[in-house]
Image (cartoon, helix red, strand yellow):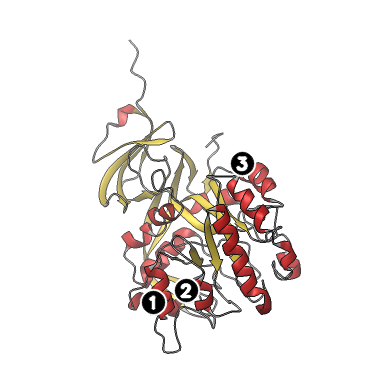
């Protein structure tokens, strides 16, 4: 007599599920089948699963979504290996923020991204070559001849579900102040023409922040929103500027884009105290210059929790909310049955933990999320310090 075939491919058993999209924070078992979430319940029969992983005492969340990172590995001097940096921090979906432009996106799409298990999406740089020469020239829009609105928009339209819009770096090192307004308007035109979103690097902008925000609308993303440079979201009295409140009200997304150097602890504290938390927490993960502190997602969720965000809100800002921003909330950012089978499991470490920014400010916390296990497409692909050998993930 033969036993019945397992109903589920994988069962995470005994953990505490925190799924803000479903309003769940409690003990749940989660089962996966054929790359999707198959069942979520207080108890599922372990005999019905081919593989059972005991996660009692651990926190289970949907696979995290990093809205801003750099993953053109080997294509630029600052891009990271997505699986090593993302899966090890519970991130299963990551968005490249303008590492490539229309001239070199094909290589990133066809050769670099498919070599990774992490789901990789992108915003296309408004400059033709993206960030390829950034480390050599010190900027990417020094010559606006590198911008072609039509070809940028066409590339985005030709890659639905893979490209989500246009990225422009409004930073004094990326674009001269006399060209900044023109670069911003060109990026706006390309986003509109492609019917995509506009992501703007607002840290260190050479033109006034209100001028930048004025060109941004619902669904557009102001990344590095909590930077401490001169033109930031606070006025000289430390109050959130009215133009920032107006942008939030009309649906502009305020994204962290941490990167160490683009997120100031004191700006975050002031904004939180005034009721302006980030919509999305992202890493801007990259290979930084010597001395720069670049945190992974599990550390940033922990850091923003230490700054005063509830754990539920910090997890929402790194799962469901970025999925919403991308228009993918029907498949990502939650562990509702039928959704993508992506999950993260964390050990909740208690103690004293300190996070830093590049302005010399520290954040003390008592709780840190340490990644125990990451599930991608219904299978374990990272566990306790190493990528799991498993073929297609």
Q: Secondary structure at mark 2?
A: loop
Number of other residues with Cα within 10 Å of mark 1, as a class: few under 14, some 14 to 19, many 20 or more: some
Q: Residue at x 38, y 44 (%)?
A: 330
Q: Is residue 204 visible?
A: yes
Give the residue number, with chain letter if any, for mark 1: 271
Residue 114 numbered tag: 3
Mark 2 touching mark 1, by CB under 8 A?
yes
Tell me the SS state at disc 1. helix
Q: Is residue 202 left or right of residue 327?
A: right
For residue 230, above or below residue 102: below
Q: Position of residue 275 (x, y in %)?
A: 33, 74
On the image, the x and y values in percent for residue 289 come to: 66, 69
Q: Are the residues flagged by discs 1 and 3 in contact, CB closer than 8 Å? A: no
**Where residue 11 appears, x then y in whole percent?**
35, 36
**Secondary structure category for the residue under label 3:** helix
Residue extending furthest toward the bottom: 237
In space, the residues marked 1 and 3 are separated at their CA atoms by 39 Å
Q: Residue 366: which quarter of the image?
A: bottom left
Give the residue pinned by disc 2: 226
- Mark sitting earlier along the chain (2/3): 3
Q: Residue visible at 65% across and 79% down?
A: 177
In the foreground, 30 or 120: 120
CA–CA distance between discs 2 and 3? Answer: 33 Å
The 10 Å Cα crowd at callout 2, few under 14, some 14 to 19, many 20 or more, is many
Q: Residue 186 bears which disc, if any?
A: none
Quadrant position of residue 306: bottom left
Give the position of the N terminus as an image quadrant: top left
Q: Where residue 292 sits in the image (x, y, percent)?
A: 60, 71
Query: How many numbered marks are there?
Result: 3
The crowding category of the residue bearing disc 3, from other C-alpha atoms within 10 Å (few below 14, some 14 to 19, many at least 20), is few
């Amino acid at each position: 007599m033969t036993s019945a075939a397992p109903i589920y491919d994988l069962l995470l058993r005994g953990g505490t599920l925190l799924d803000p999209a479903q309003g769940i924070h409690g003990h749940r078992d989660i089962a996966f089948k054929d790359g999707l979430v198959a069942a979520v319940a207080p108890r599922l029969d372990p005999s019905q699963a081919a593989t059972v992983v005991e996660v009692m005492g651990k926190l289970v969340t949907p696979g995290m979504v990093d809205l801003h990172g750099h993953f053109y590995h080997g294509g630029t001097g600052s891009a990271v290996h997505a699986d090593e940096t993302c899966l090890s921090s519970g991130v299963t979906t990551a968005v490249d923020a303008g590492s490539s432009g229309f001239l070199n996106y094909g290589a990133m799409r066809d050769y670099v991204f498919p070599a990774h298990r992490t789901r990789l999406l992108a915003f296309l740089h408004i400059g033709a070559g993206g960030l390829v020469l950034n480390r050599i020239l010190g900027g990417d829009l020094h010559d606006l001849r590198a911008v072609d609105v039509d070809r940028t928009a066409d590339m985005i339209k030709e890659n639905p579900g893979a490209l989500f819009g246009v990225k422009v770096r409004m930073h004094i090192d990326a674009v001269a102040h006399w060209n900044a307004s023109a670069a911003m308007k060109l990026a706006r035109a390309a986003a509109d023409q492609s019917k995509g979103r506009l992501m703007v690097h607002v840290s260190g902008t050479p033109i006034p922040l209100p001028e930048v925000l004025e060109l941004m609308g619902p669904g557009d993303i102001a990344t590095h929103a909590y930077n401490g440079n001169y033109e930031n979201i606070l006025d000289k009295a430390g109050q959130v500027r009215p133009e920032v409140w107006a942008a939030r009200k009309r649906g502009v997304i305020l994204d962290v884009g941490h990167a160490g150097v683009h997120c100031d602890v004191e700006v975050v504290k002031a904004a939180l105290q005034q009721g302006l938390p980030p919509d999305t927490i992202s890493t801007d993960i990259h290979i930084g210059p010597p001395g720069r502190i670049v945190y992974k997602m599990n550390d940033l969720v922990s850091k923003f929790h230490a700054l005063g965000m509830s754990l539920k809100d910090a997890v929402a800002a790194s799962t469901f909310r970025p999925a919403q921003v991308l228009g993918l909330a029907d498949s990502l950012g939650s562990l509702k049955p039928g959704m993508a089978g992506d999950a993260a499991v964390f050990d909740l470490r208690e103690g004293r933990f300190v996070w830093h920014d590049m302005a010399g400010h520290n954040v003390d916390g008592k709780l840190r999320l340490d990644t125990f296990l990451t599930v991608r497409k219904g299978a374990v692909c990272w566990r306790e310090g190493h990528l799991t050998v498993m073929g297609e993930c």
